[in-house]
Image: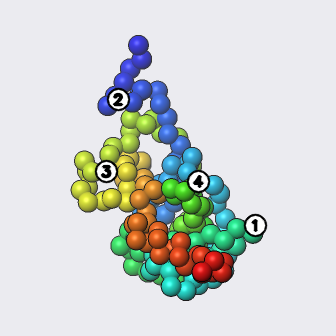
């Protein structure tokens, strides 16, 4: 029998994409990341929820760009050329997250990820936290980024953009 820690095989590994917002490190599970791209013009989306910065065209697909800074209660700032768009699978949709900088990928033992509720209560947008040499890194839970009301309003706005309504 293999060794287990908290029900996870001690040899299990997790791949993460690391990024920064205001010099703080965050991560996404790499299997949820579709691609990373440089910042492009974001087209406003009328009647979209406040969390939606607008939309971008990626190879003919219209993707909503979500304001991760707002979701994490960080102060707004002007977009910069060095910003990046991280396209992720969030539930049943592909969305883009605007981040300050993608710093790379890392592979860690799954056992090194601690459920965030046990560390910082009330952080529903993160599923776990780990510690690197630079300090703590919160791993974002992309499936819970949008509330049900925000997802419905986004679907409605995107439908109007396409002319469905």
* First in sequence: mark 3 vs mark 1: 1
Q: Nearer the viewer, mark 3 or mark 1?
A: 1
The C terminus lies in which quarter of the figure? bottom right
**Distance from the alpha carbon under mark 2 to that under mark 3:** 17 Å
Q: In the rendered view, does 111 fall on the left or right side of 60?
A: left
* First in sequence: mark 1 vs mark 2: 2
Pinpoint residue 2: horizontal percent, then vertical percent: 42, 17
Q: Write down the residue under mark 1.
A: 59
Pinpoint residue 86: horizontal percent, then vertical percent: 59, 62
Tell me which corner region of the image, top left, top right, bottom left or bottom right, holds residue 112.
Answer: top left
Residue 134 tag number: none
> Residue drawn 35% across and 29% down?
7
Q: Write down the residue under mark 4.
A: 33
Q: Is residue 88 above or below residue 15?
A: below
Q: Write down the residue under mark 2.
A: 7
**Distance from the alpha carbon under mark 4 to that under mark 1:** 17 Å
Who is closer to the viewer here, 44 or 113?
44
Q: Write down the residue under mark 3.
A: 116
> Residue drawn 35% across and 73% down?
73
Q: Residues within 10 Å of mark 1 (few under 14, many from 20)?
A: few
* First in sequence: mark 4 vs mark 3: 4
Pinpoint residue 36: horizontal percent, then vertical percent: 64, 60
> Residue drawn 43% across and 63% down?
145
Q: Is residue 131 above or below residue 66?
A: above
**Distance from the alpha carbon under mark 3 to that under mark 1:** 36 Å
């Amino acid at each position: 029998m293999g060794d287990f820690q908290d029900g996870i095989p001690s040899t299990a590994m997790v791949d993460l994409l690391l990024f920064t917002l205001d010099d703080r490190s965050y991560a996404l599970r790499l299997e949820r990341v579709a691609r990373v791209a440089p910042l492009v013009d974001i087209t406003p989306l009328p009647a979209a929820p406040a969390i939606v910065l607008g939309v971008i065209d990626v190879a003919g697909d219209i993707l909503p760009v979500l304001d991760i800074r707002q979701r994490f209660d960080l102060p707004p700032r002007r977009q910069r050329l060095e910003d990046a768009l991280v396209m992720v699978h969030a539930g049943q949709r592909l969305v883009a997250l605007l981040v300050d900088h993608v710093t790379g990928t890392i592979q860690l033992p799954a056992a090194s990820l601690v459920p965030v509720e046990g560390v910082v209560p009330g952080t529903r947008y993160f599923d776990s936290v780990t510690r690197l040499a630079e300090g703590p890194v919160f791993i974002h839970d992309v499936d819970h980024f949008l509330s049900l009301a925000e997802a419905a309003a986004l679907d409605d706005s995107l439908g109007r953009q396409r002319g469905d309504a």
